[in-house]
Image: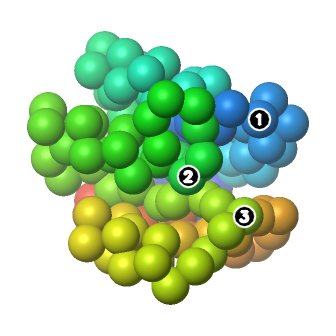
Amino acid sequence: MKATSQARDYAILIADDDSGCRQALRDIMEPEGFRTLLASSGEEALDIARNDDVHLALLDMHMPTLTGIETLQLVRQFKEMLPAILITGDTTESLMRQACQMHFFSVIPKPINKNVVLYTVVRALAGVYGRR
């Protein structure tokens, strides 16, 4: 699946407390045809995941109150199979282990790279929903 083929069928939840990073991710996803849902906190991400049709979550690790890992833990209580990608400026061995235990599809380091993000999102969607 190319990012542009059938991308409009997918909604991507982007949760990051940094508005610049949220906007950068939106600017990567939307031209490829993905619908984006933006959250500035883990709590906001939970509300969106509960009330909207979300196909994948891009979650920042370091947000106030709930981390990306904690947010996914709560989301998985009602969307068990939602694929998620963790974004962080801090890829320690401990963090990588936690992300693996939570079954994040991948961990993407900050600063984000457009090609890495798109490639990872497309692979995660294809892995869960198949190639359309």
Badge 1 or badge 3: first in the primary sequence = 1
Q: Residues within 10 Å of mark 1 (few under 14, many from 20)?
A: some
Q: Secondary structure at mark 3?
A: loop
- Picture quadrant where residue 50 is located: top left
**Percent x, y of residue 113:** 80, 68
Question: Number of labelled discs?
Answer: 3
Q: Is residue 36 above or below residue 119?
A: above
Q: Which residue is mark 1?
A: 18
**Residue type at tag 2:** Met
Residue 122 horizontal side relative to residue 112, left or right? left
**Percent x, y of residue 112:** 78, 63
Badge 3 or badge 2: first in the primary sequence = 2
Badge 2 or badge 1: first in the primary sequence = 1
**Percent x, y of residue 90:** 67, 68
Q: Residue at x 47, y 71 (%)?
A: 95
Proximity of marks 1 and 3: CB atoms separated by less than 8 Å: no
Q: Residues within 10 Å of mark 2 (few under 14, many from 20)?
A: many
Q: Quadrant of the C terminus?
A: bottom left
**Residue type at tag 3:** Gly
Q: Is residue 54 above or below residue 44?
A: below
Q: Which residue is mark 2?
A: 61
Question: Real-space Cα distance between discs 2 and 1?
Answer: 11 Å
